[in-house]
Image (cartoon, rainbow, N blue to C red):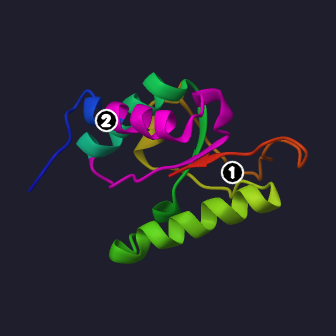
Amino acid sequence: MTAPATDGSGQISAMRKALAQARLAPEHISHIDTHTTGTPVGDVAETHAIGEVFGRATVTTLKAALGDPFGAAGAIEALMAVQSAKHGVIPPTRPPRLLLCPALARETNRLPAHPPADAERGAAL
């Protein structure tokens, strides 16, 4: 079994590298679809990493709505993120343990919008 560093340092590093490779600043990301494994260590580490890199962010998780699709998760989440950005709507969700840190995660129990269609939209997986 593996477990992330409880301080989220691995996720922080990965998020910063992904932003650098994409040549994006954190404020250009309007929607984060989280991995949320459903474990206290993993979800808290991921929440900490999101807060460290993005500050307060709109986060969603497919697993909260559908359960864990295991191997299909990445493809389904990528499709959801692309469709969300395309249509300008972030799907409602209740990220499980991400809500333990309400200062970082906004619960999306309504349909928040991405920036207007004429603005750039970004989603992070």
Q: Regarding mark 2 in the picture, which secondary structure is present there? A: helix
Q: Is 17 within the magenta?
A: yes
Residue 74 occupies quadrant: bottom left
Q: Regarding mark 1 in the picture, which secondary structure is present there? A: loop
Residue 82 occupies quadrant: bottom right
Residue 118 is at least partly visible in this image? yes
- On the image, the x and y values in percent for residue 62 come to 52, 63
Label 1, on which residue? 109
- On the image, the x and y values in percent for residue 1 come to 8, 56
> Which label lies toward us, 2 or 1?
2
Measured along the vertical axis of the image, is residue 85 above or below residue 115? below
Q: Residue at x 42, y 70 (%)?
A: 73
- On the image, the x and y values in percent for residue 55 come to 55, 23
Q: Which region is colored magenta?
A: 12-39
Disc 2 residue type? Ala
Label 2, on which residue? 45
Whether tag 2 and tag 1 are in contact, CB under 8 A, the answer is no
Q: Tag 2: Cα neighbours inside 10 Å, few (<14), some, or many (≥20)? A: many
**Is 39 displayed left or right of 86 in the figure?**
left
Q: Residue at x 52, y 72 (%)?
A: 76
